[in-house]
């Protein structure tokens, strides 16, 4: 694939090119029958120049390898000027005055700067080795191994160059050892090339297998096909039109059947040669079929990645998908579907924009284990192109950041999941087991796997997102219908609940106005009592509506504050009438207990539960308020001895305007009390449990966070959390 410019590879490529010319020029005199002294002298000079030139770019390679390719243009220009300018002196007599080749021996006469030239080349080579050594000390893993290979190659070769091309010819005044240096240079250059490109070089085993596949295809398919074609054309030689038709048919048959023949040959060769290597086409087909075979996409992806990780002997293989793309319903350990509020199922928002879903497998104690997790989304993944952790850092800052995030996640390679619209995730690859490294076959296959998974994931995500939008439309429609129904119910309740109090108010005020003198003091007192009761009833209904309006608006926010249970109950009981207080029984020890919740909202819960119990039991039936400590919490329960509730009606209790007329002993209910209980409990994160049966009354219980205060501490007093709210 196209790669961005890389100073490390470029400088090594130039050095390798200089080495190639050096190797060719060093043997030119063998190609001439009688090489003269001039030819040999200039051969020496060019070889020395190539040595200095290559050493300069080797030094640049070492510096770029150490700094991961980050060298400024000015620094690069200054470095090349200081190293390449002295190399040009090798073309003058200041380095090599005269050289000859006689009787298989080289005789050279060095100039005054020959020591400088050899020293410069040696210094540049040593500088390169120092940079690689520093890189080796700083790095780990593949980078450390790669630097070690380079050090091993040049660490052996540089002393040999100094000895065979400098020290021995200078001492003997005859050069017969330089020729040994040239072929030996293959060792350091080959090891460096392998260290840089080991994950890009063609695998020899794969090459053997593919060559055999092509030869087998030609032998079993091409040769017989060609033989049949030649026989038919010879038989139809006198019929040119038939020959033309046969040629077209043969061409079409070759185009159609050759891929099938090559596939069959590849499968046969994979069984004959190196069976440990996998057939990438067959494995990709098997993995994608497994991913599509599951109803739950996540389960299919996990199983497909598990299969690939086993075949490739990977420590881990997983995909990272942004949460903004919903992947379906989350299932718990019991197999039940989670609530719709699950972050994986939510629509994109600021809350979940930094999250990602991780699907795949990892090796634990030598066994690959599938997993599904939610974690932090990597801001620089997916990378702009497939990224390998052991490559040099690119000049692109995003690639460098992406490589850092790969290292944090323990990934050695990252591939983009490309869909039709754009990228929809990242395929992350762990290192290979048993110390092996990814080879080109693995890289090409994983890139193909990412290309195949991308459209599948994207189409599934888009379908789920469309389903989610339709559900939102349905939800909005239901909310609108519920709102209209709520308004209609409000009108019905107001007309029903206000009729009697307004009639009483109108009747008695009219009577008092017309017959005030005739009624006397007792009659007026009785009329005013009826007016007061009617006004109280109106106020009670209005308070219910105001409370519901406040809770439905979302403006009411819970403010958890610890408070003593005794003080809390005292405030709640102060809101009930004397007749109701006589019927109420408080059981359990409230002393020493405290509640850690919003006391105002909890008081609304308890007040409405008590009101409900009084209303649905007769005037002489007791109502029990029980307080109990339960595993780090306080259990508040309200029990009555009314007629009870049928099981099929329990689910309707907490809906607005639900009234059980046959059980209401006083006929004063608005159907909003338990609805207020439900909304307050939802705000506090509490569950209200109902236990009821016809003929034995009902029990409502709520478990509130709290506990017992230490003997040395006083229970906190009931606070005024919000004076304006309490006053209202």
Image (cartoon, rainbow, N blue to C red):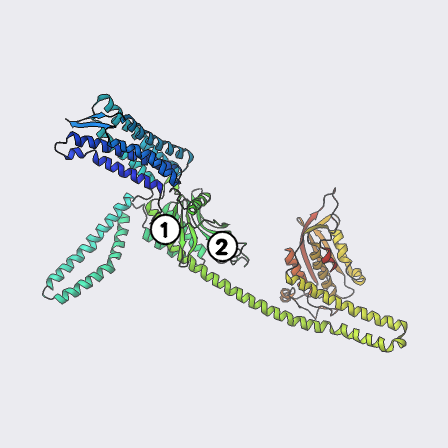
Q: Nearer the viewer, residue 185 or 583?
A: 185
Q: Nearer the viewer, residue 362 or 494?
A: 494
Q: Specify few, some or many for label 2: CA neighbours under 10 Å numbering under 14, 14-19, or 20 or more.
A: many
* Rendered view: 392 above or below 358: above
Direction left: furthest residue: 238
Label pair 1/2, CB-CB below 8 angstroms: no
In this figure, what is the number of numbered marks?
2
Q: Is residue 138 visible?
A: yes
Q: Specify few, some or many for label 1: CA neighbours under 10 Å numbering under 14, 14-19, or 20 or more.
A: some
Asked which quadrant contains residue 120, the reply is top left
439 sits left or right of 254 in the view: right
Say which mark, if any, is on residue 289.
none
Kindly identify the residue that appears in the image at 67 percent across and 72 percent down: 491
Q: Nearer the viewer, residue 401 or 651?
A: 401
Q: Which residue is mark 2?
A: 323
Q: Which badge, 1 or 2, is on the more N-terminal residue?
A: 2
254 sits left or right of 2 in the view: left
Asked which quadrant contains residue 9, the reply is top left
The image shows residue 428 at horizontal and vertical percentages of 42, 48
551 sits left or right of 144 in the view: right
The image shows residue 661 at horizontal and vertical percentages of 70, 70
Say which quadrant the C terminus sits in: bottom right
Kindly identify the residue that appears in the image at 27 percent across and 39 percent down: 17
The image shows residue 684 at horizontal and vertical percentages of 65, 55
Q: Which residue is mark 1?
A: 447
């Amino acid at each position: 694939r196209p790669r961005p410019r890389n100073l490390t590879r470029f400088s090594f490529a130039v050095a390798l090119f200089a080495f190639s010319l050096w190797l060719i020029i060093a043997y030119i005199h063998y190609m001439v029958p009688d090489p003269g002294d001039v030819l040999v002298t200039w051969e020496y000079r060019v070889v020395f120049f190539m040595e200095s030139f290559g050493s300069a770019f080797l030094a640049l390679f070492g510096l770029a390898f150490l700094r991961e390719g980050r060298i400024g243009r000015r620094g690069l220009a200054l470095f090349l000027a200081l190293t390449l300018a002295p190399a040009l002196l090798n073309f003058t007599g200041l380095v090599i005055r005269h050289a000859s080749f006689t009787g298989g021996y080289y005789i050279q006469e060095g100039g005054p700067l020959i020591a400088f030239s050899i020293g410069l080349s040696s210094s540049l080579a040593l500088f390169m080795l120092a940079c690689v050594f520093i890189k080796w000390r700083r790095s780990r893993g593949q980078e450390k191994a790669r630097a070690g290979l380079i050090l091993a190659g040049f660490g052996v070769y540089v002393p040999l160059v100094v000895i065979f091309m400098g020290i021995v010819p200078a001492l003997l005044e005859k050069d017969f050892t330089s020729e040994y240096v040239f072929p030996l240079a293959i060792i350091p250059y080959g090891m460096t090339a392998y260290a840089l490109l080991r994950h890009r070089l063609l695998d020899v085993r794969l090459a053997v297998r593919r060559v055999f596949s092509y030869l087998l295809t030609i032998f079993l398919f091409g040769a017989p096909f060609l033989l049949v074609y030649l026989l038919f054309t010879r038989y139809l030689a006198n019929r040119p039109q038939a020959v033309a038709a046969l040629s077209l048919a043969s061409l079409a048959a070759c185009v159609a059947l050759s891929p099938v023949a090559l596939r069959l040959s590849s499968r046969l060769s994979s069984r004959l040669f190196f069976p440990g290597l996998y057939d990438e086409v067959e494995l990709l087909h098997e993995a994608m079929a497994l991913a599509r075979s599951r109803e739950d996409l996540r389960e299919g992806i996990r199983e497909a990645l598990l299969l690939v990780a086993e075949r490739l002997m990977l420590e881990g293989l997983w995909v990272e998908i942004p949460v903004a793309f919903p992947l379906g319903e989350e299932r718990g350990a019991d197999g039940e579907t989670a609530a719709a509020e699950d972050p994986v199922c939510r629509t994109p928002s600021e809350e979940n924009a930094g999250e990602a879903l991780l699907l795949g497998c990892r090796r634990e104690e030598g066994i690959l284990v599938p997993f599904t997790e939610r974690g932090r989304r990597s801001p620089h993944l997916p990378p702009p192109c497939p990224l390998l952790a052991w490559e040099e850092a690119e000049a692109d800052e995003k690639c460098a950041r992406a490589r850092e995030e790969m290292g944090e996640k323990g990934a050695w390679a990252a591939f983009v999941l490309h869909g039709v619209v754009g990228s929809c995730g990242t395929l992350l690859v762990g290192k290979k087991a048993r110390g092996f490294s990814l080879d080109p076959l693995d890289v090409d296959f994983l890139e193909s796997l990412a290309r195949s998974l991308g459209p599948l994931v994207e189409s599934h995500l888009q379908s789920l997102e469309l389903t989610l939008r339709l559900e939102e439309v349905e939800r909005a429609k239901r909310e609108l219908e519920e709102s209209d129904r709520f308004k209609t119910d409000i009108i019905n309740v107001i007309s029903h609940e206000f009729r009697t109090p307004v009639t009483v108010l109108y009747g008695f005020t009219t009577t008092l106005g017309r017959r005030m003198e005739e009624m006397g003091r007792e009659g007026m007192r009785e009329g005013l009592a009826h007016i007061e009761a009617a006004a109280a009833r109106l106020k009670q209904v209005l308070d219910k509506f105001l409370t519901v309006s406040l809770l439905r608006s979302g403006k009411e926010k819970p403010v958890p504050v610890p408070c003593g249970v005794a003080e809390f109950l005292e405030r709640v009981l102060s809101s009930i009438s004397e007749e109701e207080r006589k019927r109420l029984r408080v059981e359990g020890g409230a002393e020493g207990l405290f509640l850690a919740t919003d006391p105002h909202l909890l008081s609304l819960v308890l007040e409405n539960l008590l009101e409900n119990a009084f209303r649905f039991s007769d005037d002489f039936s007791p109502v029990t308020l029980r307080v109990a400590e339960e595993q780090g919490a306080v259990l508040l329960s309200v029990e009555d001895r009314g007629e009870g509730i049928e099981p099929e009606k329990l689910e309707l209790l907490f809906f607005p305007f639900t009234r059980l007329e046959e059980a209401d002993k006083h006929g004063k209910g608005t159907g909003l009390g338990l609805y207020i209980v439900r909304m307050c409990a939802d705000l506090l994160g509490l569950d209200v449990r109902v236990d009821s049966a016809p003929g034995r009354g009902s029990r409502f219980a709520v478990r509130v966070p709290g506990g017992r205060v230490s003997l040395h501490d006083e229970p906190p007093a009931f606070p005024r959390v919000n004076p304006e709210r309490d006053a209202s």
